[in-house]
Image (cartoon, grey):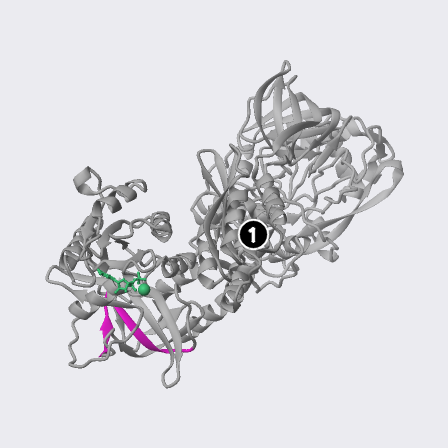
Amino acid sequence: MSKAETTTMPTIKMAKSNKKSSMLVKDLALDVKVEVGRLIQQLKNAGIEVSNENDSITEKEKKKLLDYLQEHHGAKEAGPEKIILRRAKTSEIKVAGSQGARKTVSVQVRKKRTYIKRTETQANASAATPAPQEQLIEETPPVLLTEEVITTPETSVDGTTTTTETPAVKQPADKTKKAKPATVSTPVKQKEKRHTDLDDEEGRLKKKKKIRSGREEDIHQYDSMIGKGVHLDFALSEEAENILEQRRRKGARARKTVQVQAFTKPTAPMIHEVNVPETISVADLAQKMSVKASEVIKVMMKMGAIVTINQVIDQDTAVLVVEEMGHKPKLTSEYAIEEALTKEGNDITGEATHRAPVVTIMGHVDHGKTSLLDYIRRTKVTSSEAGGITQHIGAYHVETQKGVITFLDTPGHAAFTAMRARGAKLTDIVILVVAADDGVMPQTVEAIQHAKAANVPIIVAINKMDKPEADPDRVKNELAKYELIPEEWGGETIFSPISARTGMNIDNLLDSILVQAEVLRLTAVIDSPARGVVIESRLDKGRGAVASMLVQQGTLRKGDLVLAGFEYGRVRAMFDENGKPVDSAGPSIPVEVVGFSGTPNAGDEFMIVSDERRAREVALFRQGKFREVKLARQNAAKLENIFQRMGDEKGQRILNVVLKADVQGSAEALTQALNDLATSEVKVRIISGGVGGINESDVNLAVASDAIIIGFNVRANLEARKLIETEGVDLHYHSIIYEVIDEVKNALSGFMAPEIHEKIMGLAEVRDVFRSSKIGAIAGCMVIDGAIKRNFPIRVLRNNIVIYEGHLESLRRFKDDVSEVRSGMECGIGVKNYNDIKPGDQIEVFEKIEVKRKL
Ligand code: GDP
Ligand code: MG
């Protein structure tokens, strides 16, 4: 029979510190619930002279006893062979504080299990020579015998399972701010009976301390370093248990056993990398951080949000929570929900083959966009049905001898930008139509900017070549300024002189498009569920919601369940651009779909889902979430996110403005005045300045370019107002020119990089350095000036020279994480990513104060 001590020891913490305190042996025995005689024997073994229970022992002696007991792990004491622990039972232990005050401490035993020493079972099984005791304690977990009732300690010893389950004894929560450092904790060997005591009462343990098991000497060193008495926990926290559980799963051997006296270790908190999908329930988020959902709810409450455990929160909120709880958020795809959906068997897999290019025609008004689209359509669209009525479905495709081309038939950058403002990328190639008799005009330039912003290659169609006054070289010259250089001049842009009226060279243009498409290597998978974008939608009197959609991947079929934006529905019927019913549509093919529950928005991406309930869930969720996100975006746009609106060109910060005025005169005056505000640091760019009310296209441009809208004596129309609201666009109405200028001036001032002033908040001197393999270096410090604050930048100074600049990893006073330590106090400081700290170094905490400048 082994003599291994297998008892679990309760945590004993003094609530108050008193270095001189001493106590009577009998009181100590009472406190730790050990028979007086036994305690005296232990004291004697530890070399402390006591003769009877009325002798008093000092802190020092207690410490000595503690050391002795730790060292021996109770090896010299015959302990019980079995222990029985019961789950989540607490008891109270009376502990003497200073001035003789008694403190009640709760001890919680978290599992109810019967353990037996392994040596015993091993001996039974193999009659092996017992290993030296120390080793056994280190490496051999006790064997779980039974999880049965506590009142049957004589449970059969047959169940010699080798489970390494570890019971936990919950330490008392003492993390309250007012808790003073403990001066001593006295571990004393306990008899089995004590466990029964432990089971007797329900605890009132509320707060739970994070306990991490660690190397004892680490703790010891740390604790004494920061001027604190030795403190022990004989418990494995829930967290430690979780870790052990994980290790066990990995097949690693759990090293902590019931008899190990685990110390509370001042480790850096465990930082999890938390995957945050687009949405997540509070419970799931908590699980990902390995905390209780109630913790998350608490944190969110502090942040001002009342949530329930099953509530689904959005990504932005979840990220805040994760950061607030000290973990690292990792954003998973914005379309996580969709991804989850595609995983239901909708993944786009398979061989990718060539697909037709999707083309948008842009250019200045009256340069011939509509004429070109019409000509191509009239002459090239294969109208299989004689007399088929041309349908406007937002796009059409043509079949040339060299290949298929799909045209989006809403020309101009307004539509292009509207799509882009919604995040959809439909267009592969832009045809920039420039009239040969008119040359580059303002909307030509805008179109170039929009195409470039979207990173879409441009093919220039020099139109109206049939006109005698056509001057294609002038067009080439003017476009060279915008980096559109013809191939014959050594550039890369295809220029195609055409006439939309006569049809001259149009075949050439189509060929050029296909050449460009080849360069782009456009591919798609045909044999897969469809995905794509809604081009436009409307409510049809007879057919209900009708949506024109462009398939980008896979094949859309009649009967498919489609989810697009907030809407979903089964494809009841599909029609091509000739109004002819079709059963399927592959990549780059536009179709008109009937069967949606409502009208999805232009620019909404669509996908196929397998389950109607799921489709409804997602659609509903999006409706709710969209509102929130939009709202949040609106607020952000209005408050501090002003920098987002700043394009940054050559170090100059740029405020994009969409300007609409009542008359040309005021538009010009304002443009002039606003341009004059430019400095080397900031400037205003009027991306669009015109006369008339603010319409939807203006708003889309502002969205796509992160611009503010200024309306001078004009107002937004209804559609524009709706869009402004949903997109959170910054709109300003004015009627006095200098007010506009003042406001823009203020905005620009906000964009100017503020001057940064520094203020030193506190200085601490490193007295001692404690190193641990797990948590790096912890500097035991004395704050000698000001206050050390947790969340500010710091510098490490050696001989008054800055040797490191960074942040604090941890700031602790005794065991507690604190946010601030004032002058004259000691603290433990861990510097993030810096371990070379030495005694004598100084740690300086400073604050960066931004001082705004004015234009
Ligand atoms: P959009 O505003 O860019 O769509 O231009 P339109 O297609 O509406 O054309 C504007 C005007 O230019 C119309 O009167 C057309 O007939 C005319 N037009 C368009 N293309 C040509 C062309 O190649 N040659 C000539 N002579 N006129 C053209
Ligand atoms: Mg037109």
Q: Main secondary structure of the magenta part?
A: strand
Residue 650, above or below 703: above
**Where's ligand 2: which quadrant?**
bottom left
Residue 118 appears in the figure: no
Q: Ligand 2 closer than 8 Å to the CB at disc 1?
A: no
- Pick the front one: 315 or 390: 390
What's the residue at 70%, 24% (across, down)?
763
The kind of secondary structure element at disc 1 is helix
Assess whether residue 307 is covered by the magenta stretch: no
Please name the residue that numbered disc 1 is placed on. 637
Residue 116, above or below 36: below
Position of residue 96 in the picture relative to residue 762 (left or right): right
Assess whether residue 585 is covered by the magenta stretch: yes
Residue 379, above or below 84: below
Residue 275 appears at what percent x and percent y? 47, 51
Task: Tell me the amino acid under the disc marked 1.
Answer: Ala
Q: Which residues are magenta?
A: 581-597
Residue 492 appears at what percent x and percent y? 22, 42
- Pick the front one: 39 or 306: 306
Name the quadrant of the N terminus: top right
- Crowding around mark 1 (Cα neighbors within 10 Å: few <14, some 14 to 19, many 20+) is many
Position of residue 77 in the picture relative to residue 345 (left or right): right
